[in-house]
């Protein structure tokens, strides 16, 4: 690790980069590599490599922790969402945010539904229940009622669970949470995992709790849990007389072992990430036009990402310019989520931002503008964050953000001279 450059010249202005060896967006945290390796070796020695006792132990521990009736471990969050939507039999529009990861919409499409997008909330970037209500009402009025409502706990920030539950109940439709970021989050003291009809977590490497790859489906609905359990095994209930066309979405014993290891460290990781956010916040204090996306009062976020919303007017630079400043310093960053899903090739230009699934009627409306989502997508930037990051690294990155804003005029001029 290089030494602190203090208030030295920014790299875009000709100074030496703050992180000459580069600072990646994410580094997976493995607290005890030899300890984990020993557990993996023990699994290999059993010769039982998938769908065995480790998977069952993981499911039991999580059902206990999340206080939900049924937990099914699957190969990925995407597969878990696909199987949940398949089990729910979604046909027609599924209302969900555009400001989320693409897999939220892909799963709807794969299960035969039509992703239909609603706006994000300005304050915390989760699904806006008011806008979603408008979309659901419009669909109902058009005689094409929505088949489901879905929200994402973006960055680990719990969504507006009460308002969304009311909305889903009012329309008599299931409520599906993409909880990919939120294993370890809580809303008003209650663990995320028990809200809505079903919540689906991801254990992929960029998430706070990781198994390398993996997903977790949590629900109180025994029938839904059974369908996902069978669905992850091709639809085979054990008799090889498949009940429906499922997929292979099993979790291996090795992945379950990693997940169990990761689960033991989850609370410490979440606590540490929240500490790092405070280190970052202390440096940013008083910088105009840059805010950290925070969970609601009384809620806990995993801080899967440390995301800033940058308002170019007072700050002096937009999020894209800030990303270039950071890149020159060796610091990686991402614009989560830009482009938002309705702007992506897979979905753009299609009616109502919804891609008709094969054999299903087109959703027939006009592409709906999502101005809040578009603006937020242009304003967000997530600098690096990982659970074993040192305070000093967070502090230095935050100082670069402060410095870039303080020298915005010179930085803008420098960036014009070097396009890219
Ligand atoms: C990572 C992620 C997914 C996909 O998870 P996988 O386990 O990789 O399938 C889905 N939704 C969101 C919001 C994600 O961030």
Image (spheres, rainbow, N blue to C red):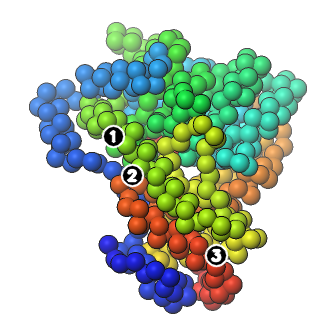
Q: Residue at x 61, y 43 (%)?
A: 295
Front residue (pair 43, 355): 43
Local packing at callout 3 (Cα closer than 10 Å; few below 14, some 14-19, many 20+) is many
| Label 3 residue SS | helix
Q: Quadrant of residue 86?
A: top right
| Label 1 residue SS | loop
Pointer 2 residue: 387
Q: Look at the numbered disc 2 and say if its residue's Cβ is closer than 8 Å to ligand 1.
A: no
Local packing at callout 1 (Cα closer than 10 Å; few below 14, some 14-19, many 20+) is some
Kindly report the distance in space between the C-alpha atoms of the residues bearing marks 2 and 1.
Answer: 10 Å
Mark carried by residue 373: none
Count of marks, rendered view: 3
Pointer 1 residue: 265
| Label 2 residue SS | loop
The percent coordinates of residue 48 (x first, y second) are 19, 26
Kindly report the distance in space between the C-alpha atoms of the residues bearing marks 3 and 2.
Answer: 27 Å
Q: Residue at x 59, y 73 (%)?
A: 402
Indicate which disc, 1 or 3, sits on the residue closer to the N terminus: 1
Indicate whether 174 appears above or below 335: above
The percent coordinates of residue 138 (x first, y second) are 85, 31
Indicate whether 383 appears above or below 18: above
Q: Residue at x 53, y 33 (%)?
A: 186
Pointer 3 residue: 405
Local packing at callout 2 (Cα closer than 10 Å; few below 14, some 14-19, many 20+) is many
Q: Look at the numbered disc 3 and say if its residue's Cβ is closer than 8 Å to ligand 1.
A: no
Q: Residue at x 79, y 53 (%)?
A: 371
Image quarter in which the C terminus is found: bottom right
Indicate whether 224 appears above or below 399: above
Q: Are marks 2 and 1 in contact (CB under 8 Å)?
A: yes
């Amino acid at each position: 690790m290089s030494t602190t450059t203090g208030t030295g010249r920014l790299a875009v202005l000709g100074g030496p980069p703050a992180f000459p060896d580069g600072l990646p967006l994410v580094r997976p945290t493995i607290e005890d590599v030899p300890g984990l390796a020993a557990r993996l070796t023990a699994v290999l020695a059993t010769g039982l490599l998938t769908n065995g006792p480790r998977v069952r132990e993981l499911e039991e521990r999580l059902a206990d922790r999340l206080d939900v009736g049924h937990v099914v471990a699957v190969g990925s969050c995407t597969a878990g969402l696909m199987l949940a939507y398949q089990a729910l039999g979604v046909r027609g529009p599924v209302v969900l945010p555009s400001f989320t990861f693409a897999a939220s919409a892909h799963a709807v499409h794969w299960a035969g539904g039509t992703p239909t997008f609603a706006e994000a909330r300005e304050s915390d970037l989760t699904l806006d229940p008011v806008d979603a209500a408008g979309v659901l009402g419009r669909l109902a009025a058009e005689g094409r009622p929505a088949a489901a409502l879905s929200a994402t706990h973006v960055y680990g920030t719990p969504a507006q669970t009460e308002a969304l539950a009311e909305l889903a109940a009012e329309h008599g439709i299931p409520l599906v949470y993409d909880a990919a970021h939120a294993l370890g989050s809580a809303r008003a003291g209650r663990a995320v995992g028990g809200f809505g009809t079903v919540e689906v977590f991801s254990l992929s490497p960029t998430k706070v709790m990781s198994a390398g790859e993996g997903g977790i489906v949590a629900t109180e609905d025994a029938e839904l849990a059974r369908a996902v359990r069978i669905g992850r095994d091709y639809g085979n209930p054990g008799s090889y007389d498949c009940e429906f066309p499922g997929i292979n979405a099993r979790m291996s014993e090795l992945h379950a072992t990693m997940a169990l290891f990761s689960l033991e460290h989850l609370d410490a990781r979440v606590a540490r990430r929240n500490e790092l956010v405070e280190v970052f916040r202390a440096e940013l204090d008083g910088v105009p036009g840059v805010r950290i996306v925070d969970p609601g009062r009384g809620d806990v976020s995993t801080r899967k990402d440390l995301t800033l919303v940058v308002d170019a007017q007072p700050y002096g630079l937009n999020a894209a310019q800030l990303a270039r400043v950071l890149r020159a310093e060796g610091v990686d960053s991402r614009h989560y989520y830009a482009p938002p899903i309705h702007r992506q090739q897979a979905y753009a230009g299609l009616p109502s931002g919804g891609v008709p699934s094969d054999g299903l009627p087109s959703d027939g409306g006009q592409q709906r503008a999502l101005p809040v989502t578009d603006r937020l997508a242009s304003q967000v930037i997530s600098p690096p964050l990982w659970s074993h990051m040192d305070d000093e690294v967070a502090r230095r990155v935050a100082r670069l953000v402060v410095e870039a804003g303080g020298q915005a005029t010179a930085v803008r001029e420098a960036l014009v001279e070097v396009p890219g």
